[in-house]
Image (tube, helix red, strand yellow):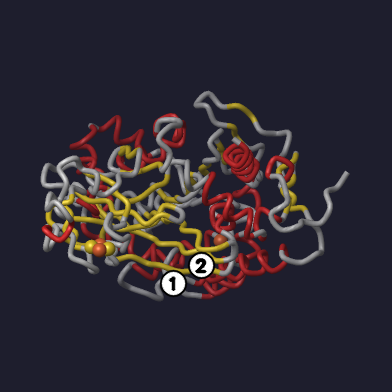
Amino acid sequence: MDMPLPTRGRLDPAEMVQEGRVHRAAYVDPAIFEMEMDRIFGRAWLYLCHESQVATPGRFFATQMGREPVIVARGRDGVIRVMFNRCTHRGAKLTMDETGQAKRFVCCYHGWAFDLDGKLAEVPLPEGYGDGAYPPEDGSLDLVRVPRVENYRGFIFASLAAEGPTLAEFLGPVASSFDDMVDRAPGGLLEVAGGVSRHAYDGNWKLVIENHNDTLHPRFVHASSVAAARDQKDTVHSDGAGEVQIKQMRQNGAPAAVWESLGIWASASGHSFMGDYHTDAHMAARPAEDPVQMAYRKALEETHGVERTEEILSIQRFNTVVYPNLSFMSRFRQLRVVQPISVNRTVVTTYTFRMPLAPPEMFRDSIAFANVVNGVGSLVLTDDLETYARVQDGLASQGGDWVDVKRGMGGDANEANGTLRGQTGTSEIHLRAQFAAWRRWMTA
Ligand code: FES
Ligand SMILES: [Fe+2]
């Protein structure tokens, strides 16, 4: 029997995810959103940043873990720590800068100064605090650390919960996407570079991570940008960047058979990845005999040898979603962090990575790719954002309580690597996996 219309905050998350369908309250109910911040963002491993963003002592990166403001900082000892961005005196946030170089974190309010490792180092006019034993020796006024921090091949994650699965257990088979990204970089070296792109949309945070492995939508949502790209001459831009953009947009109009034959894999933690739908040898408008490609391959062979290089370059992977807050493209070195703001507002920040030991043209290609796929001027991105807003509006209506996620259901197959594979490339297996994880976090 169908459940009654949602009464705010009165729905039980356990009832909201059923076989092949999800209750719309998951997207529109502010009380459910608050619960998600506590139970999902307050417990799961969340991606924070790449270690290159805090490469040397004193470098810091400030971000949010759900509701919680945190600072990732590399100490004088080289250790990366994650602390709450909250002064232990009367609570002011210690930094409003997103990145920077600090000797100490000095509070704007009464000047308490904290070392890079969070230790309260100096208090102005200490005698005024009673016995004058300020800062106290016992560390009771040091910054509070986020309970768990782990680094997988340079990607830093943290969890607000003291207990739970390890990062390796949490990532499971999706760790292979990070391997793909790092292994493709000569010397295993990657660094965030080229600035940051950020946009917000009027919709629930789940919409973007659902969309990135939704291979059914490009032919429809992106029809107009595909048509515009098809109208362009192949040679419209001569510096290479235009070719990257046109090729990428045209690929969105690939025939149904291309999408159906793609692989899509999901794992128990709600993560997923899809195969690469680019039919070219390399999307970046550079054939294998291109001098840049040849130099890249040579650099990679110096790291891995010929055989292993071949194996690495043969991996076909496009988007990977790490539930709940990360989506990245290992092959194209694009990474997107999802920050929920409210039940119907979300911010997405995109980073591009440079491979310092690869030919510099490859970084230019990555930036061109970033602009067409993730940049705020991107035609495809704006198509998607418009769609999220329409979905959000539709779900807020009384035109039905359920979201249907049955495509491909019953055809999911176990794979040796611990994933489930969708029956075809357009299966909604990734949505079923995300909501299975959602239900588990929300009811545990
Ligand atoms: S609130 Fe930070 S020093 Fe007073
Ligand atoms: Fe899209």
The reply to whether residue 178 is visible in this rendering is yes
Disc 1 under 8 Å from ligand 2? The reply is: no
Mark 2 C-beta to ligand 2 under 8 Å: yes
Q: Is residue 159 left or right of residue 94?
A: right
Tell me: residue 246, above or below residue 34: below
From this view, report whether residue 76 is shown above or below residue 309: below
The residue located at (69%, 54%) in the rendering is 9
Number of numbered labels in the structure image: 2
Disc 1 marks a residue whose amino acid type is: Val
The amino acid beneath tag 2 is Leu
Give the alpha-carbon distance from disc 1 to disc 2, as whole Å: 7 Å
**Residue projecting furthest to the front:** 130
Q: Quadrant of residue 359?
A: bottom left
According to the picture, the residue beneath numbered tag 2 turns out to be: 381
Q: Residue at x 11, y 63 (%)?
A: 125
Residue hosting label 1:
376
Report whether residue 57 is seen.
no
Whether residue 436 sits left or right of residue 337 in the image: it is right
The spot of residue 421 in percent (x, y) is 60, 34
